Image: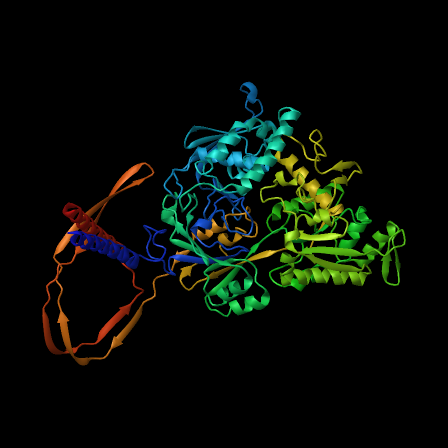
Amino acid sequence: MRYPRLYTKLWVVSIAAAALLLVYTVMPLHSQASSGLPPMTPYNTLYSAVVVSTPMTSNSSYNPNIFTTSGIWTHQYGLNYAYLAMYNLSSGTWIPDLAYNWTIQYNLTVGNMSGWAKITVYLRHSGWSNGQPFTCWDLYATNLIQALIYDALGNVTWVNNYTCIIWVPPDAVVNSNNLMTFYYVSDGGLGIFINYQLYEPFIENLSKNWNILYAANFGYGTPQEQSEGASYIKTEFALLHKYEPTFTFPPPQNGPFYVCDITPSEIILCKNPYYWDANNIKIDYVVLYQFTSTTPLFAALETGELSFYQGNLPPSIASVVLKNPYMNYALTPGAPGDALYINFLWPYMIYPQVRQALIYALNLTQVAEAAGAPYEPVPEPNNAIVYPTINPHSFVEMVQYWDQMGYPLINYTYNPTEAAQLLESVGFTKKGGVWYTPNGTPFKLVILVDSGSASNPQLMAMLTTVENQWNAFGIPTTITIEPSTEFPQIYSTMATQYALAYRYGPPGFSIIIPDLFPVNGYFEGYPINVTHWWGEVTLPNGTIAWLWGPNSQTHGICPPQQVTVQQMKDCVFMWAWEANHNPWFISLDTPYEEVWYNTKYLQFPPSNSWVWAESPSLEIAGPMWWSILTTVQPKPVVTTTTTTAPVATTVSTTTTVTSTTTVVTSTTVVSGTTTTYTTTSTVPVTSTVTSTVTATAPPTTVTVTKPVISTALVVGIVVIVVVIAAVAAVIALRRR
């Protein structure tokens, strides 16, 4: 009597296995992650790539914490994390995203809020990819996390889930709606990347210590509270680096797309159905191939495997890619470009005359030409922080400002004679074609470069040109390359062994002028401090000052609180004058970013479209990914038509009659709203009639398209098989 039961169980297991096999067979690749989306095709998928040192291998290897180990791809603003609002560089207007509106009130006079500003932000009913609504709780959590990088927005509260308030203290208020929108509503160009529920344990701990976090971020409270806040930030930020949120894959993300599947070779992102503008996005997937070097990247571009890529290609590779008739590129302006940071610990670099002489001794046009397209020479006046490529009006205004003040900016046109006079003015002499310092030793230079940067042939072409030009001028110069793993600590361990260090240049003040947060130490390398400089400068009137406050009680050259737009410009222009007259870095080029796109299956905007003005070279400069995703369109599916001549054939026909229809109703809950969908699936009941006839088939026209499995058919088959399996299971149980 045991054997019949065993056979029954085996039969049930076989039915269940068959059901699973059928589901696995008929559903498309990555179907588990992309439930509800059509199958992946070149017409609905944007293929791109990232070059990473450590590719992820599976879903379990993904950590959505963007502060985790470098070398692993985690996010791209505008792709899997959305903005509250975005700045359109080309039109100078704001694009509402997760926030549909906001209001700003200045100079509050209520109680202890005197001088504060109140920003009320109204959120759309958008959602995270798991269906959870995006609310003010998420903005609150983001603010707390940003406090750990001294970038808190203010004090975030809310009226309800979709009406948030950012209270900005007096010292952080700028009397300009445009600037306040940039700093606080758009968060300086950052996406909203923190999900409250995902980080709840961490957030709750931070909220309990908000008073000292606030003191450290805004300089309020007692000196002890500020000190405790700084220590607390250091400890918590170290913990944040290691934090791994608890979640069931895929993690919730609030952008137009979310990470839905990961393999050792690619990261697949699916369209987020809960994103407020999902219906206007016409592609369903983004695939990011994970490459560990540029070799497979270049091959993928040459063969047209990628449909979109942002990044500059060596001219030799670009010429091959352009042989593909579908491959095109657009140039987008960038700033600030490559730079050499000057080490003030190097002998005689403390003298501004020596630093100016080094720039005059360079033919920067030839330096950029050595790299080739898309690099261009630096603008004149150069080394002035405000860049004409992204801020043309302010650049002109800045030049006119100093001309009218009687302290014009320096053009630094190649002039070896001027360079020699500057060196001689501080006691240098030239003997036998070599420059000697006042103490009689040859003046030599060492340029420090990390191995990662040195792998870029265009960059090395520029640096080698700089080396050769200084050698020709009479300053013996060498380039030393150190492993990237030694950076940034090497700036301390080799503090006296390099004269200049290569790094990407100091960021130009944003299109909105200015972003003052980074200036407090960033430009001179803080916390890396490449220059080992304390920020002392001489103002145009001869006064000694500091670019930033040397301590918490002393402010730098910029006004500390409630500044007007003109005061802000005065501050920025002063920074520009100092960078130009008392340089602590040397700008080498004006970069342009190549954006490559493939028109075989997708229709991209023309190369003169506003979309390409949203510079991808600076992540926070403009919403490049968002603008691409909302404008790219699939091309019509290509069909092939074949006509055959008449032919006499013997045909055996089998007729299948379908006679049964089953109505299946499913209920889905979307963000608190219950929606009922009714789908009709056909269950075939067949009768077979076989006949043999001889006939002459007429000319036939066959249209061939890429096969697509009907979603309704898949659902119907799956439901039927599952029902059969369930019935079989019930029967088996009753027989036990």
Residue 206: percent from left, percent from top: 53, 31
Q: Nearer the viewer, residue 608 or 529?
A: 529
Residue 241: percent from left, percent from top: 55, 42
Q: Nearer the viewer, residue 151 or 613?
A: 151
Q: Is residue 550 left or right of residue 724?
A: right
Q: Is residue 150 visible?
A: no
Question: In the displayed structure, would residue 300 be above or below residue 79?
Answer: below
Question: In the displayed structure, would residue 299 be above or below residue 609?
Answer: below
Q: Is residue 272 left or right of residue 584?
A: left
- Tell me the residue at 69%/46% (across/down): 399
Q: In the displayed image of the protein, which residue is found farthest to the top?
A: 111
Q: In the displayed image of the protein, which residue is found farthest to the front?
A: 1
Q: In the displayed image of the protein, which residue is found farthest to the bottom?
A: 648
Q: Nearer the viewer, residue 598 or 490?
A: 490
Q: Is residue 488 visible?
A: yes
Q: Nearer the viewer, residue 117 or 341?
A: 341
